[in-house]
Image (cartoon, coloured by chain):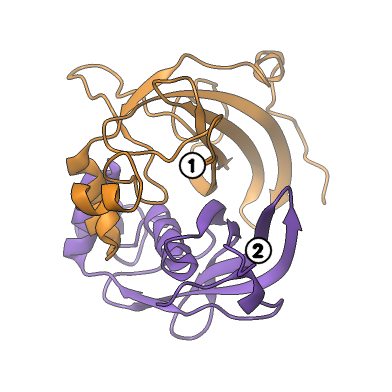
Chain colours: A purple, B orange
Amino acid sequence: MAQVHFEDVKEGDEIPQLKKNCSTQQLVLWAAGSGDFYQIHYDKDFAQATGLKGLIVHGALKNAFLGQLLHDWIGEAGQVRRFGCSYRGMDEPNQDILCRGVVTKKYSEGGKHFVELDVWTEKPDGKKTSPGTALVTLPSKN
Amino acid sequence: MAEVAKSVITDEMHAAIGKEGPPTVLEVEKTNCRMFARAVGHTDAIFFDEAAAKARGYRGIVAPPGFLGTPIFRPGGAAGVPGEMGGRGFSVPYKRVLNGGTDYEYFPDAPDGDVICAGDAITARTKIVSFEETEGSLGPMLITKRETVYTNQHGKIVAKMYGTVIQY
C-alpha cells in the first residue's frame, strides 16, 4: 500500500479490511508464539470437556490480528500508539474472521497527527466478536 | 446495575490497589519476533529480516504489535507471566475466569521511549488498577483491571498493557 497521510483520512472512513481464517495449525503456531498453551485452542476433547462446542481461537490472537490491520494501513511512516479489544465473542478455526476499522477522530497535537479508530473482528454473519479501539499517528504531507 | 448481594473484595485486595508486584523480565529475540509474526500472518519484512529492519531505521528486527517479549521459563517454577493472567494471588469464591480483553500502548518516540526490537530485555511491572463488582447474565462477577509497565534495558518506558480479568 502507498503511504497513507493524515490529510488522506477523514472521520467515518473505513480502513482496508483484513480477512483471516485460522487453521488449527495456525492456533498451534500462535500457542508457541504467544506462550499460551491452554488446550481449548488445540485439543478438541479438552475443549469439549470444558463445555465448549469445539476449539476456539485465542482472544489475544484476534487482538494481534487487529494489530496487523493497523500496521498494514499506517505504512512505514505511521506509528501504532495504542490498540486493543474486549474478548466478547468466540471465533472458531476454519471460519473467516474479518478485521475492520473505522476512523472516529483525527487531530493534531504537539506536532504529531493522531487518528483514533474503532477496530473489531467480526464473524461471517456480521456479529462483532472483539470490539476495540486504536490510536495511531500518521505523517503529514506538509 | 443491580446491587451485588455480598462483596468479595477483601481488605487485602483493597490494599493491593495501585501497588506494583514483583518485576518480570521478558526477552525479545529474533526467533520469537519471527514466530509471533508468522503466527499472526504478518508480511512486513521488519518482523522477520534484520537487514530490512535496519534499512528502515530500526535497531534490529521489530517486535510485532502485541509482542512484548517472552518470559523466562524455568522448570518447576512460575514462568512469571506479567499482566492480567499473572499473579492473581487472591482467594475469591468464583471458580471461573475469563480474559476480558487487553489494550496495548506504545511509546516509540525518543528520547524517553523506543520501538521494541530483538535484543531488548524488557522488565514488566504490574499493578492492580481497580476491582469492580457487577451482576450480569452470568451472575455476580468480579472485574479486575491491571496495568503493566514495560521498560527496556536503558530504562525507557516502551509499552503499557491494560488487562481485564473477569471472575464469576
Residue A115: mark in rendering: 2
Q: Nearer the viewer, residue B79 or B143?
A: B79
Q: Name the residue located 43 percent from the left edge and 29 percent from the top edge.
A: B82
- Furthest-bottom residue in this view: A125
Q: Residue at x 57, y 67 (%)?
A: A119
Q: Going by the image, does B163 lie left or right of B17?
A: left
The location of residue A63, given as percent across then percent down, is 45, 57
Residue A30 seen in the figure: no
Badge 1 local density, few (<14 within 10 Å), some, or many (20+)? few
Horizontal and vertical percent for residue A111?
70, 51
Foreground: disc 2 or disc 1: 2
Reply above or below: B72 against B34: above
| Residue B125 to residue B135: above or below | above
Relative to B28, is A122 on the left or the right?
right
Residue shown at the point (45%, 34%) measured from the top left: B85
Give the residue pinned by disc 1.
B96
Is A42 left or right of B104, judged from the image as shown? left
> Residue A15: horizontal and vertical position, in percent?
54, 77
- Secondary structure of the residue carrying tag 2 is strand
Q: From where the camera sits, is residue B23 visible? A: yes
Chain label for disc 1: B
Q: Amino acid at mark 2?
A: Val
As shown in the figure, which amino acid type bears the numbered disc 1?
Arg
Label 1 secondary element? loop
Q: What's the mark number on residue A15?
A: none
